[in-house]
Image (cartoon, rainbow, N blue to C red):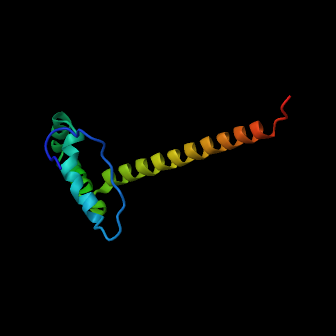
């Protein structure tokens, strides 16, 4: 695994039985530098309280991440909800279209 430089391949997690999943949140500190540039890190670190909340969040310590953790959690929930709704709508459209096609008399 490469720890330096930009990611050069797709990044995925796969569920495995008997795996220590708390490592996922603990390892995010290794990745956040890949997606947050120096200017933003400088800005975040210029405010001690914001920096602390961000650092706790990145470390997976949600109970200490305060409003940063709440914002990200709410955004994640909204994103997942939207994805589920979009998927459901697409399945309904596909099912309806297929039903009409299969049940339309052919001339």
Using residue 60 as the reference point, say whether residue 30 is left or right of it: left
Residue 88 position within the rendered picture, expressed as x and y whole percent measured from the top left: 60, 47
In this view, which residue lies farthest toward the front? 107
Q: Name the quadrant containing residue 33.
A: top left
Q: Nearer the viewer, residue 26 or 39?
A: 26
Residue at 66% in and 44% down: 92
User: Could you tell me residue 102's position as x and y percent?
Assistant: 76, 40
Q: Residue furthest left?
A: 4
Q: Residue at x 16, y 36 (%)?
A: 38
Residue 97 percent across, percent down from the top left: 71, 37
The number of numbered discs placed on residues in the rendered structure image is 0
The answer to whether 38 is drawn above or below residue 79 in the figure is above
**Residue nearer the viewer, 102 or 74:** 102
Does 27 appear above or below 97?
below
- Look at the image and tell me whether residue 51 can be seen: no
Residue pictured at 51% horizontal, 49% vertical: 81
Q: Does residue 24 appear to the left or right of 48 in the view shown? A: right
Is residue 15 among what the camera can see? yes
Residue name at image x 68 percent, y 44 percent = 95
Residue extending farthest to the bottom is 18
Q: Quadrant of the C terminus?
A: top right
Q: Is residue 66 above or below residue 35?
A: below
> In the displayed structure, does residue 42 sit left or right of residue 88?
left
- Left or right: 52 as drawn, with respect to 83: left
């Amino acid at each position: 695994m490469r720890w330096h430089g930009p990611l050069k391949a797709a990044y995925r997690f796969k569920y495995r039985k008997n795996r220590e999943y708390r490592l996922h949140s603990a390892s995010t500190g290794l990745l956040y530098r890949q997606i947050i540039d120096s200017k933003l890190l400088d800005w975040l670190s210029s405010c001690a309280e914001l920096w602390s909340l961000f650092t706790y969040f990145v470390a997976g310590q949600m109970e200490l991440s305060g409003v940063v953790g709440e914002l990200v959690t709410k955004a994640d929930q909204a994103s997942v909800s939207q994805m589920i709704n979009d998927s459901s709508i697409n399945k309904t459209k596909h099912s309806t279209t297929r039903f009409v096609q299969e049940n339309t008399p052919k001339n």
